[in-house]
Image: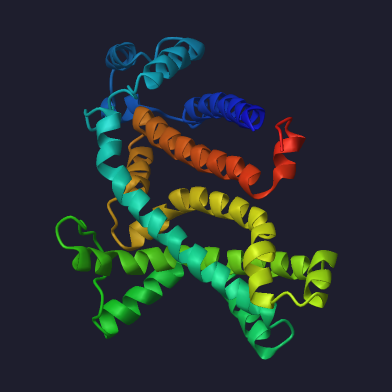
Amino acid sequence: MLNYIATRVIQALVVLVLVSILVFLIMYLVPGDAVTVLAGPDPTPEVVDALRRKLGLDQPLPVQYVKWALAALQGDLGVSYIIGRPVSELIATRLPATLELAFAAILIASFFGIMVGIVAAQRQGTWVDGAITAANSFVLSIPNFWFGILGIITFAVWLGWLPSGGRKLFSEDPLNALQYLIMPAVALSLDSIAMIARLVRASVLDELSRDYVTVARAKGVGKNWLMRRHIARNAAIPVLTVLGLRFGQMLGGAVLIEAVFNWPGLGRLTVEAIKNRDVVLVQGTLMYFVVIYMAVNLLIDLSYGLFDPRVRSSAGGKV
């Protein structure tokens, strides 16, 4: 098991280095830079050169990357060109809101996706299965932000049950904070519910067709006990993979939902930084997204060994 963990961690570190290079370079591939924003209209060449030297943009890209990477390893992501505050400080103020939204959405997606998928598999070929399949196809064909707008019109404007946007802290008023969270979290989770339900249905049906299930049922083993002890566990690995991927996608996909619901998260901060050509802030926010995404997927990858000993043995670990 230790060999398996070490292999996955080393792979994650290599990928992280490669992605950090890509994140650093991607903003330099787009025409223009922060100097054009800071210098104002019609700047003189002397002003532009002075700003480039001050920001360190006159140095070769490899030198800039090494300095940025070494500082990032120490938790220093630089200072925002436009706002003038440390990037880590800006991220720290916005990250809790995005994580709160993403965690709420993944919990909703996990619960309802798994439940709906199991029901569809147990009712295979019935009208229930057909209705669930049709609903999943409809949800996957519509963007999340559209459901968000529809939710605002229905529950905020027409019915007046929920606020149309903003965020409240759970530490101040849990019930009020939940009212602000529920609509953006549900809107963000809908496509994940449909995707997880489809995968769970296919995985459970695949397990139900295996010989060990037939033999167990012939011996009188109860269907519910068999589902809990064997079928659900064996069908969990592909579901775990999707959950990890969906959580990472929710962090990035929350940008539109944050805009629709005026949610003060990291996605809105990233969009504002891109508009202002604030390279340092964009790099910092993107790296936070990458690190969180990779950390979640690494945990999901490591959990495979707990569910399936064959994964550990294939990586050189002991079963």
Image position of 257 (left or right of 262): right
Q: Quadrant of the N terminus?
A: top right
Q: Which quadrant of the view contains residue 297? A: top right
Residue 175 position (above or below residue 41): below
* Residue 67, image x, y percentages: 41, 13
* Residue 249, image x, y percentages: 51, 51
| Closer-to-camera residue (239/48) | 239
Whether residue 142 is visible to the viewer of this picture, yes or no, is no
* Residue 61, image x, y percentages: 49, 15
Whether residue 74 is visible to the viewer of this picture, yes or no, is yes
**Residue under the point 78% across and 69% down:** 213
Q: Quadrant of the C terminus?
A: top right
| Closer-to-camera residue (285/56) | 285
**Residue under the point 56% across and 38% down:** 298
Q: Which quadrant of the view contains residue 151? A: bottom left
**Residue under the point 53% across and 41% down:** 299
Residue farthest toward the bottom in the current orientation of the protein: 127
Residue 292 position (above or below residue 193): above
